[in-house]
Amino acid sequence: MTGLAEVVAAARLLEGVAEVTPVQLSRAVGHVAGVDVWLKCENLQRAGSFKIRGAYVRMSRLTPDERARGVVAASAGNHAQGVALAARLLGIDAVVYMPVDAALPKIAATRDYGAHVELVGTTVDEALAHAREHAERTGAVLVHPFDHADVVAGQGTVALEIVEQVPDVATVVVPVGGGGLAAGIVAALAEARPDVRVVGVQAARAAAYPASLRAHHPVPAPELRTMADGIAVGVPGTVPFEVLDRHHLEVRTVSEEDISRAVLLVAERAKLLVEPSGAVAVAALMADPGAFDGPVVALLSGGNIDPQVLLRVVRHGLASAGRFLQVRVRIDDRPGALAALLQDLAASGGNVMHVSHVRTGADLAYDQVTIETQVETKGPEHCVQVLQRLRAAGYEVQPD
């Protein structure tokens, strides 16, 4: 059982190891959510996420014999870096299994901290199977990303900082993957501040907890296809699930569009770089304004994002926010027609980012061409104005 006493003991172990990360009042997110919103910036934690908390607590309690055998872990990236950093601080050899498509910066950082990295499988669950086999074969200690009481207690230390930094907090919104972070926070607050509501958030395309909590036992997620790779976990952990089921955690889900808009808003307005999994708490606030009593603390759980992924997420967020318009326009296939279209787009204030030609199609005459354009706009109202101007100029417009 993990409770307040275990979380407080974990906090003592983490003194001088984990940072007390700042909270930041976000007027931009608060304006959307309709309440005061504080961002708990675990994206600024050592190794870029909250994972060092649980990994270090777990590994610091290993016996001398266990330390000598080394540790093994599996992760898409954040737990990998937490384990690697904790191993370096404690002088323990570490092997980490990661999915083959894990973000390159996360792989590089894990290696830089001194861990040996093996790339296997396509999901964290597949990597975890390899890590378990490695532990059985070599005697190394498996440091699970969420399914251990010490890990849960370590992650729960975030809650102690929240109630000290935002004493009047009414709601804590937290990302949920395997459930270790949420379980630690729930376990601590259930005793320290039972008046605080805790809400978990999962990506809709990687959501095992809603069905699991309804069934009162872990149920596999029906799919794992989300940009939020840090919380794409197939089955809840037994240890955290027991805590979250006992305390009846409320879990919400958010779409990929919700997540990308949240990443964009936090970057633009809060000036904070977070990975998609780290932004799901903000995504939940944006998706359902007025549903949360304030003050709200939204946990930004990690900031380790591949620049290539960031580019795709930002483009997706711009489109979801109505600031990136894809338009198809049919024009005559003659010299000057494309130039005239681009001039009209420029006159509308749209910034053309990409142009392509489609010269074949069942609905095209032999002397016609479809122009597919990607246009940067100033928002939804400007999108409407761009389309209205093109139609008024006589173009046959088909928004994509």
Image (cartoon, rainbow, N blue to C red):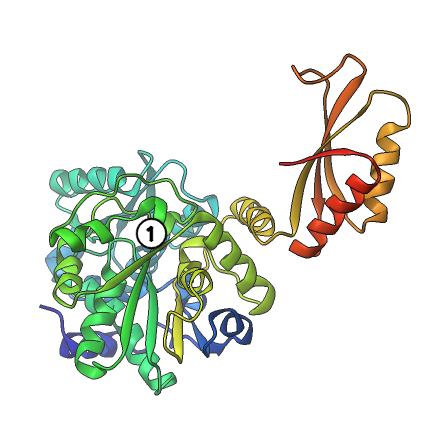
Given residues 117 and 356, the one toward you in this image is: 356
Dividing the image into 4 quarters, which one contains the C terminus?
top right
**Dot 1 amino acid type:** Ile
Give the crowd class for mark 1: few <14, some 14-19, many >=20 residues within 10 Å.
Answer: many
Residue 144 location, x and y as percent?
21, 53
Query: Which residue is located at x 25 percent, y 41 percent?
Result: 125
The residue indicated by pointer 1 is 231
Residue extending furthest right? 336
Judge whether residue 183 can be spotted in this image. Answer: yes
Dividing the image into 4 quarters, which one contains the N terminus?
bottom left
Instruction: Say whether residue 107 is left or right of residue 332.
Output: left
Residue 248 location, x and y as percent?
17, 65
- Count of numbered circles in the view: 1
Query: Which residue is located at x 29 percent, y 75 percent?
Result: 159
Given residues 390 and 264, the one toward you in this image is: 390
Judge whether residue 17 can be spotted in this image. Answer: no
Decide: is 316 above or below 39. Answer: above
Residue 47 location, x and y as percent?
40, 61
Residue extending furthest top? 366
Instruction: Say whether residue 193 is left or right of residue 314.
Output: left
Given residues 34 and 137, the one toward you in this image is: 34
